[in-house]
Image: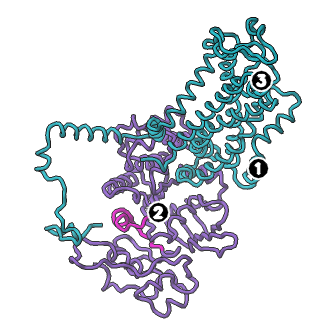
Chain colours: A cyan, B purple
Amino acid sequence: MSDPTTQAGTPAPRSGDDKPRPGMSERSIGVLGDRKKARLDELARASAADRGGVSLVRDAARRLRRNPVAIIGAAIVGLFVLVAIFAPLIAPHDPVQRFDELTKNLTVDTIPGASGEFPLGSDPLGRDFLSRMIYGARQTLFVGVLATLIGLALGVLIGAIAGAFGGWVDVVLMRLTDVMLALPSLLLAITLVAMASRSSQWTVIFAVAIVSVPIFARLLRGSMLAQRESDHVLAARALGVKERNIVLRHMLPNSLTAVIVQATLTFAVAILDAAALSFLGLGDPDINRAEWGLMLGVDGQRYFEVRPELAYYPALAIIVVALGFTLLGEAMREAIDPKNRR
Amino acid sequence: MSLLDVRDLSVVFQRRGERPFTAVDKVSFTVEPGQTVGLVGESGCGKSVTSLAIMGLLPKRGNKVTGEVLFEGTDLLKLRPDDMRDRRGREISMIFQDPLSSLNPVIPIGIQVAEVLERHQGRDRKQALRESRELLDAVGIPDPQRRLTEYPHQISGGMRQRALIAIALACKPRLLIADEPTTALDVTIQAQILTLLKQLVDETGTALVMITHDLGVVAGLCDTVNVLYGGKVVERERRHELFAHARHPYTHGLLNSVPRLDSPRGERLHAIRGSVADNIPWVEGCAFAPRCDNVVDACLEGPPPLEPTATGGDLRCNNPVSEEVAVR
């Protein structure tokens, strides 16, 4: 309990410690200038304030703000979401209207290019290409959000059941997710769309959602199992908390962080998958729907020799938005990783 | 009738393909109402497993619990899981070693206290929160109104352990099991928490089972002490008797290895030779024999029986330390 050397009246000489210690004596404090003293006080106050409860969320948010990758990702995502939401205000024209001044110049090998009224020119049907690009953001956000949310909901349900019950329930559910993971996700999505009798945007959303389910399920099940062994779950059991509440109040809320970060990453994949399905002609058959994947796949491909911009812009938009979500997701994952906490 | 009467409690861990491991081997002890009983021993001696077995908190699979745990005459081991769940937190509570990991990180302190009251006392949220504030106040948490809405990471380690004590004692249980409640805390906070525990069990008449490896904790708190080695009780004694005349060589060694303020300078600390074996072979003799200074032939022939001593305790030793050479 007590170090014997501290009991002696005089400090005991220690081996290996014969150099005079460079500690601060009263004198060295005394010679500090007023400015330095003020600075010291400021530092002391800051560190005292800092220690008053740095929550995981606040700590992660602080690290996110310092990470340039996160800033870039958030900027792209923010811009994309704004464009999608305010599409009717931003877009110069109606995206489905065919303009006479454009259609009259359409021939087999000419598509009108940029002009004052139509900054990105025409699409092959005489519609304003810029407005269709802007409305495409809206469609992409809609598909991405819905697909991710449906996938998240189903994945969380399966993962939570597997993690909560364990045993054979866990084994059965996890083997099912293994089967789904064993198939390449795009192939599985194509199969699902092909199985639908009539394709619409909903078949795309559903297919993309299903593909993301096993990832969410596995991730949540893993953290649920870790939570089950945690001290606070044992402590809750010791208080007689009912099993249902242990799962819903203790295990589940503490397991969600990883899943929420994964959702950001899944969003990027959902956008790419949805675009890929449209590109392959498995998307919404409605020709009026402005959708980047469709624009790239049908117009871009068919008229690539005539006007390659018809392919460039949708492709660039898909890449940039997917990149934005990936950057943000990766930065979030890094930020909440306890190993990076300082 | 004793409040808690543990009779021949054994816990055997059995994993497929491995030899069964006896973590707790026919442990018996009693706790009288309002009494404080210590379970002392080094890591791996079975003290935590004993407490989890009493609470019915061992995993369902992979172990076998035998014996009886009579709580006011009812065998807890025979209760249906639902009945046992209703008693946990209401009649028997437990506090754990690490106060941070024992609290749910995503629920405010006040709600965590309130939920126990809602669960066992049927209080509504409003009233439960009011009582929570009083409880937090009673365990010496400053500004309890504010703490109600704060999360575990926002308060200090000592306060977290106080909050856990408040949760454990919220329903005024008759028995509190404290599993190394001060190990994760600073020395200064340890003393405060022990004082608080002592004061609370005295006030409420709660009996306390104190599980610890720290003899200092035992000295300050326990009426009776059970010393465990290799899953068996090797010595049981009232506190003063134990500290004055430890008779088992293991207890004696433990007491001797506590650093003392008045020991001569330069004197080396006593240590018990060796370390606990992984699977302790009580069948082949006394498990402590390989580390014992007093070992005699009989120690290697079979486990010595637990026999009553003249001072009213029990002792499992063939060749106890004689009183003349007991600790200063």
Task: Give the residue type at disc 3.
Answer: Tyr
Front position in the image: A315 or A19: A315
Circle 1 sits on which residue?
Answer: A182
Q: CA distance from mark 1 to mark 2?
A: 61 Å
Report the magenta residues as a range: B212-228
- Please give left or right for residue B313 compared with residue A203 in the image: left
Q: Judging from the image, what secondary structure is the residue with disc 2 in?
A: loop
Labels 3 & 1 near each other (Cβ < 8 A): no
Q: Judging from the image, what secondary structure is the residue with disc 3 in?
A: loop
Task: Give the residue type at disc 2.
Answer: Glu
- Please tell me the numbered disc located at residue B32: 2
- Please tell me the numbered disc located at residue A303: 3
- Please give left or right for residue A259 compared with residue A97 in the image: left
Instruction: Between label 3 and label 1, give the one nearer the viewer.
Output: 3
Residue A165 magenta-highlighted: no
Q: Quadrant of the N terminus of chain A?
A: bottom left
Labels 1 & 2 near each other (Cβ < 8 A): no
Front position in the image: A17 or A251: A17
